[in-house]
Image (cartoon, rainbow, N blue to C red):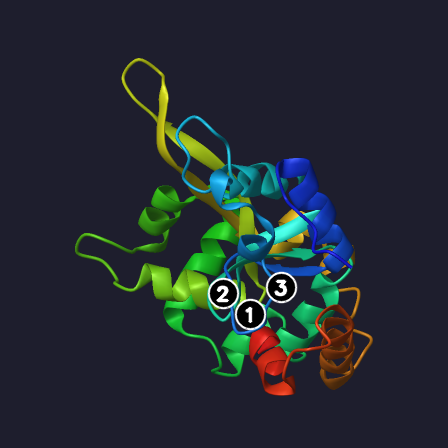
Amino acid sequence: MSNPTIRNADELETLALERGLLPFFACDIPDCSIEDFTPSRYWFAEGVDGPWEWRMEVARRGMAAYGKLFNKKAGLVSRAWYPDLANYRRDGYDFDARYEDGLASYKDKCIMDVLLRDGPTLTKDLKKAAGFGGNGMKGFETVITRLQMQTYVTVHSFEYSKDKHGKPYGWGVARYAVAEDVLGAEVTRSAYRRDPAESKARLLAHLRSLCPQAAPADLEKLIR
């Protein structure tokens, strides 16, 4: 069977929903990522939308979570598979319980407090409100990546900065939110009835069906 080809946002979303777990960049597992399935002519071509623009549209639609979900790198996880990923990664802890047990840092809590209070928040505003930057705390990118990997936070949408004439420019700026505000608590927490080990086994079995040629250690690494 030939590999799928992604040429627009609709095809990207369809593939993400079909596969369930879709890293953005090529990794140790061949034929597994957006990069693997997208023709080179769509990458960084002037005047042509490509994966960077498509991911913004897919994230906005909310049918799949987009964020740093695979080895601290970006990717998409469908609403069907995010619950098991969250159950496995959270290991039985909602964020408050994780913090109370000393398993989350004060910096983590500062970001979570802002998102729980204010809802989806642009990166620059989140940094400021949580006390990062300037003379404040350091390491925002490390913390926001950790919270995405733990499935407490995901990307809600992207927005372009605008020049003085109102024309958008640059890369899209992420607006972050707690995962429950993007996918809904009824989705995000729907696998809590399972033991985290069962969710891990389900994820690995699904990945083996997608990538039967992959080494078990590489599959474990992808969801760790």
- Mark 1 lies on a secondary structure that is loop
The location of residue 220, given as percent across then percent down, is 61, 82
- Mark 2 lies on a secondary structure that is helix
The location of residue 11, given as percent across then percent down, is 69, 41
**Residue hosting label 2:** 147
The location of residue 192, given as percent across then percent down, is 77, 72
Looking at the image, tell me whether mark 3 or mark 1 is earlier in sequence order: 3
Q: Which residue: 73% across, 65% down?
A: 83
Residue sticking out furthest to the top: 165
216 or 197: which is nearer to us? 216
Q: Evaluate whether residue 169 shows in this view.
A: yes
**Residue hosting label 3:** 32
**Residue hosting label 1:** 150
157 or 55: which is nearer to us? 55
Q: Which residue: 30% across, 13% down?
A: 165
Report the mark closest to the observer, 3 or 1.
3
> Label 2 amino acid?
Leu
